[in-house]
Amino acid sequence: MSLEDAIPDCFRPAEGLAREAAMTEESFRALYERHARSLWAFLYRMTSDRALAEDLLQETFYRFLRAGASPEDDLHARNSLFRIAANLARDAHRRRRIRLLFGSHGAGVESLPDGSRNCGDLRLDLMRALGALKPRERLMLWLAYAEGATHKEIAAAAGVRESSVKSLLSRARNRLAALLRGQPDKEGS
Amino acid sequence: MSSMPCPFEDRVHDALAQMRAEPAWPDVLRQHLLECPSCAQLAAVAAALREERARLTGFAPVPDAGAVWRRIQRRAWSDAAAAAGRPITFVQGLAFAGAAGVAGACLGATSEWFQSLCARGAAWVSAVAGPGVAAADWPAWVMLAAAMLVAAATLVPVLVWLIIASERR
């Protein structure tokens, strides 16, 4: 009987961990280099908080590995990563609302990252307008137009029916355009 | 703007999805964008968001892949260890609850102070409910209030612990 056999089951790594071990550091690095920056941009736009975006980025990769998703199929990996990131951003938004409800503000929401101090008014307007949208609208617009995601991918990440994506996107786009034109927001966020 | 979707919208959307490889509008769509305010708006929003994405990914302060990999490995092992320790924690909780129950029973059976406290409580409830009313005849609202008090005293610490534990995770 080998030492490996003698280890009780409860001290063996979970199934997900076994799959994680199958992914080498090298393949993780390649996956990370391909997607980390666009994921960070997405998470930063969803949360408006640099530190939180970084935390959620690491959590996204952790959950991706724990779920045992294959890094070989890059498109599938990208969709999985964005879906996980979208869920995490949604949870973070809920937690922030609960904190605000109970008067604990936690980390402040940043207005701008360092690199954007010299931006023009249009960029500032875009950020403000995006911030005024509902989280789901922001998510859908970003995935559709910044990431070029298909309706199916957007539906999976936003948790809506695929058939609804077109109309929801259209509504979100009209709201964003109206906000950018400086028209008063009728719906609020 | 018209609420009817433009029939070209899907083509504009597809063209946008392909534009990363070939950043130019096909001629047919370029002409259409000049004439259709809905699709022009779509193109403008998409252009603004793409520009924002390019700017953010350009300076994204992402941590080093190696550092993230090591952190993930540590976290995975600590999670596995925590999962392995969960049955032990459960048994410890059971043992603690049993010990607390036995201690409470001993206190109730032997402590004069505790018994006089219970008697005073019963007398107060009887006074509220009306003179000469036995505990069994207490009105329903008193029983309900007492049950809610006991439930709150039990559940609130558990809920607080759960919230703190989930925040730490």
Image (cartoon, rainbow, N blue to C red):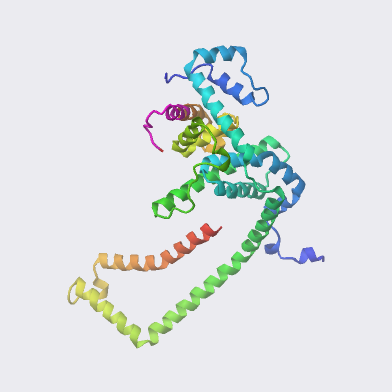
Q: Quadrant of residue B117?
A: bottom left
In the rendered image, is residue A24 in sight? no
Residue at the image point whose x is 53% and y is 20% from the top: B9
Residue B160: x and y in percent read 45, 63
Depth check: A160 or B169 in front? B169
| Residue farthest right in this picture | A1
Residue furthest front as drawn: A118
Q: Quadrant of residue A37?
A: top right
Q: Residue at x 28, y 81 (%)?
A: B119
Q: Where residue B36 appears, x then y in whole percent?
A: 49, 15
Residue A53 versus residue A104 in the image, above or below = above
Left-right relation of B154 to B118:
right
Residue B96 placement (x, y as % from top left): 51, 75
Asked whether residue B110 appears in the rendered view, the answer is yes
Q: Is residue A117 above or below residue B151?
A: above
Q: Residue A135 at what x, y percent from top left?
A: 48, 39
Residue B103 colored in magenta in the image: no
* Near-viewer residue (A169 or B33): B33
The region drawn magenta spans A173-188
Q: Residue at x 56, y 49 (%)?
A: A51
How many discs mark residues in the rendered view? 0
- The N terminus of chain A appears in which quarter of the rendering? bottom right
